Structure formats: C-alpha cells, structure tokens
Image (cartoon, rainbow, N blue to C red):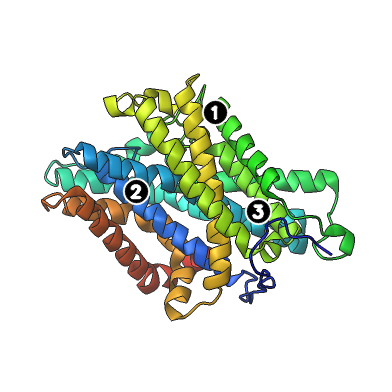
Amino acid sequence: MQTLLYKTSRPAPPPVRTPLEPAGRLLYIDNLRWVMIMLVLSMHAAVTYSHLGSWYFMEDTHVSLPETFVFGTYQAWLQSFFMGFLFFIAGFFVPRAYDSKGAIRFLKDRAFRLGLPLLLFVFLLQPVAIYCIYLFDSPSSGVTFKGIYSHYISDGRWMGGTGPLWFCEALLIFCAVYTLYRVLRGRMGTVGSSASKIRRLPGTSLIWVFIALIAGSSFLVRIPWPNGTNFYNLQFCYFSQYVFFFSAGILAYRQDWLNRFPSSMGKYWGRAALFGGLTLWIAGIILGGALKGDLAPYQGGLHWQSLLECCREQLAGVGISIFLLLWFRERFYRQGKLAGFCSRNAFAVYVFHTPVLIALSKMMVGLHWPLLLKFLLLTLLSILVTYVLSAVLLRRIPLLKNIL
C-alpha cells in the first residue's frame, strides 16, 4: 500500500478521477490550459506598457518607478510558470497520442496540428502584425502590405517570424525527440497495465532536487544566452524549464501522478512558492543593485544575481504549477458553457491574438489613463475581441477549424 509523503492533520481525500472529454482530455487540465493562454495575452499587454521584455509595439510613455516595480513583479512571477505549464500539459498528452497512433501517424498529426498554425503565423499573421504598426503610425505614408510582405520574405525575416508560435515550433522539436527516443527504446507499456508499473510518488526532497536542476541548468544556459537574447525567436534562457516540464508531463501521465498526488502537496508547494519566492525576490532587489537601476547582472552571466534569480524563478514556477494543478483538480474539474467556450476557442486565441492586441493598443495610445489601468483594459479587450473573433469567424472556416 502506498505511503503518502505529505502528512496532513486529517486523512487525505481519495484521488479525484475526473471525467474525460471525447478527445481524451481531463477537464481540469483543459481549464488550466485556457487560463494559461489568457495569461499569455496579459503578459503581452503588460510588456506594451512596462517596456520590460520585447513585443511588437511598446507605447512611448514614461513608466514611473512604482509602476515598473508592479509590472516587473507581475511579469517575473508570471514568466516563472505560465509557458512551462503549457509544456507540461503538452507533455502529459504526448504518450497517449503516441501509443494510439505509432511513430509515423503521431508525427504527421503533430505536423498538422502544430506545423500548419506555425506556417499560418509565419507567412500571414506576422506580416499582418507588422503592417498594423505602420498602418496606425502613418496611414498616409504609402506603406503597403504588399511592400512589407515583399521585404519580409526577401530579407529572410520570415525565418524568425514565429511570434508567440515559437511554442509550436519548440513543441514540434520536443515531439520529434520523443519519437526518436520511443523508436530507439521500443514501445513502452502504458500506466496501470500492471502493479509493478506504479512507482512511488516524487516526495519533497526529489522535487527540491528537480527545482535545483532546472535552476542550475538555467544559470549555465544564461551565461552564453542571457535574458533578452534569442536565436530566431527562440529564447534559450527559458528552455531548461521547458524541457524539464515537458519531460515531467510525460512521467506524470505514465505514473498517474495527477490522480495520486494528495491535496496537501499543493498547499505545501503553494506556500513554498509564495514565501520562499518572495524572500528571494526581495533579497535580490535589495542586495543586487536593482534599486539603482542595474538590471544586467540579473539577466545572465557569471553573476550571483543571475543564480539567485534562477533559483527564485524555478522555486516559484514549480511551486505555483503544483499548487494550480491540485487546486484545479479539486475545484475546477467540470466545465459549464462559459468554460467549455473558453476551452474550445483557446488555441485560436493563442494563434490570432497578436495583431488584435497590437491594433487595440495602437487605438488606445490617446487614452491618458494610468498605465496599470490601461494594461488591465488592454488585457480584457484583447481576450474579449479575440474570443469573439474566434467563435464568430475563425473556427467557422473549414480548414482553420481543423487546426484550431
């Protein structure tokens, strides 16, 4: 009989076996997925006004020190988990898809579902996004979409024109590596086929080791590729977490972790992320030179500030991820009409939100509100407009509906 590795003051409830959708997805995982995609939109809206990070259009306005602190805290904590979480979710469903389809059909399916949206963005939505900036800046300048598109192709800028769809590109690479591993190792058994396949749950010590491994790898990667650098729009400074989270998703499926983790585990790691992460965050700001405006040592290189930030980032990222997984498992394992609508349209929103967010932010330039209020308004409007666009138009187009 399995011994729980997290003690509680009362017996832990039995594992929650949540219903599956026809596509085979756990409903609480689907709910997490569309929430993460909304957070992606909020991140891009934040960069528009904070100037912390990179985005297509950033409004030319003064950002006060308190506003910079609020934006910086929000973006740093959001960055610690939201994209890694999407890789974890993607990894969780990879073994099931491979088991049912085999190597060739699995790769064809991934190429269709990930590759076609990637190509759509690179060769259509990226030029449209660039055109939106010129259109609002100088509508009478004579700049045409045809001219922008011609330079975009001839100058080779399309090779890095993946925008937010770098996620699909990276996921395609991860799936190809997984397929190679499966082919070399031979077909693996499925979870639950025999009692011997069920292993012990990862305990506190192992998860701390997991955090340390990601933090150490991130620190080493950020020596040659610090924060703010990219290779054809792939930011390697974050890829250590993505690889570990994707792999953890595969293991979570194989060993049925999500149904077997006790609720107390989420509470423990939620507290660890909040209090431990805040301690490292405040210590780094006070001792590392951030108050003097010296942010370079935090970005990478052989600096203790970079190592501390990597530790803070991964403690927060892993802790928040575990907390959210178990919280959604216990509280949000069903879908009503609104959640079902958000879930069905989430990927279309992810693919198409870039030009929508740019256009809305350009239209709001003349709105002289405090930046934090403009950020909230831009986030809400971008989510609303893109969801309506997806439901009313995009997912009604036959080819798009098949890939979105």
Q: Residue at x 46, y 31 (%)?
A: 230
Residue at 65 percent of width and 53 percent of height: 249
What residue did someone put label 2 on? 44
Q: Percent position (x, y) of residue 284?
A: 41, 31
Q: Quadrant of residue 1?
A: bottom right
User: In screen coordinates, is 337 left or right of 135?
Assistant: right
Task: Specify the farthest residue to the top.
Answer: 302
Residue 219: assigned label: 1
Specify the quadrant of the image occupied by residue 205: top right
The percent position of residue 366, horizontal first and vertical second, equals 11, 51
Using the image, determine if residue 302 lies above or below residue 240: above
Q: How far apart are marks 3 and 2 (CA)?
A: 26 Å
- The first of marks 1 and 2 along the sequence is 2
Q: Earlier in the sequence, mark 3 or mark 2?
A: 2
Residue 98 to residue 309: above or below:
below
Contact between marks 1 and 3 (CB within 8 A): the answer is no
CB atoms of marks 3 and 2 within 8 Å: no
Question: Are the two marked residues, 1 and 2, in contact with CB atoms closer than 8 angstroms?
Answer: no
Residue type highlighted by circle 3? Gly
Q: Which amino acid does label 1 sit on?
A: Phe
CA–CA distance between discs 1 and 3? Answer: 23 Å
Residue 286: image location, x then y, percent: 35, 30
- The mark that comes first in sequence, 1 or 3, is 1
Q: In this view, does 313 lie to the left or right of 375?
A: right
Residue picked out by circle 3: 249
Q: What element carries label 2?
A: helix
Q: Nearer the viewer, mark 1 or mark 2?
A: 1
Give the amino acid at mark 2.
Answer: His
Residue at the spot 78% in from the left edge and 60% down from the top edge: 3
Mark in the foreground, 3 or 2? 3
